[in-house]
Image (cartoon, grey):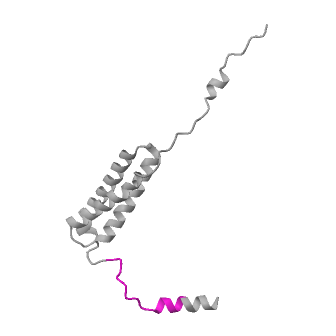
Amino acid sequence: MKYIIISTVFFLSYQLNAQPLFSENGHPEHVIVGAIIGGGTSYLVYRKTNNKFKAWLIGAATAATIGYIKEAVDPKWFNGVRSKKDFQYSVLGGVIGASIVIPLKRRKPKKTPNIDAAFNQEKPVFD
């Protein structure tokens, strides 16, 4: 346990010189968030409708809509500037994320027994 704590403190205090994921203009972040929104939405819609095209379309449209709303309120709520590039990267991420439904296999509907038919059968008449 002592070695784990010493190793953790050592690695936390060690300065790394790698390139950070966060950039100055925020384009990777817009792609990532757009992909998460588009992918999550398209997966949920696909599970509900079992229609790949509809799921892809709704997922990409949701990411585009949220990206547009974010850019519309950016100057007022986030003290930023509206950026057409940020919106385009959000839409790109949404299209990429929504494309996760394409390789999914079609679900077969569950076969449910017809209970009414089982109870409404004609009973054989015994002579």
Looking at this rendering, what residue extends furthest in the right direction? 127
* Quadrant assignment, res 113: top right
Q: Looking at the image, which residue is at 52% across and 39% down?
A: 109
Question: Closer to the camera, 86 or 51?
Answer: 51
The main secondary structure of the magenta stretch is loop
Residue 2: image x %, image y %? 63, 91
Q: Looking at the image, which residue is at 62% across and 24% down?
A: 117
Q: Look at the image and tell me in which quarter the C terminus lies.
A: top right
Question: Closer to the camera, 93 or 65?
Answer: 93
Residue 4: image x %, image y %? 60, 88
Residue 13: image x %, image y %? 47, 92
Q: Is residue 101 left or right of residue 92?
A: right
**Vertical relation: 63 (above or below) 127:** below
| Residues rendered magenta in the picture | 8-22
Looking at this rendering, what residue extends furthest in the top direction? 127
Does the stretch in magenta take in 84?
no
Q: Looking at the image, which residue is at 50% across and 44% down?
A: 107
Q: Looking at the image, which residue is at 34% across and 59% down?
A: 96
Q: Is residue 45 left or right of residue 9?
A: left
Residue 85: image x %, image y %? 22, 66
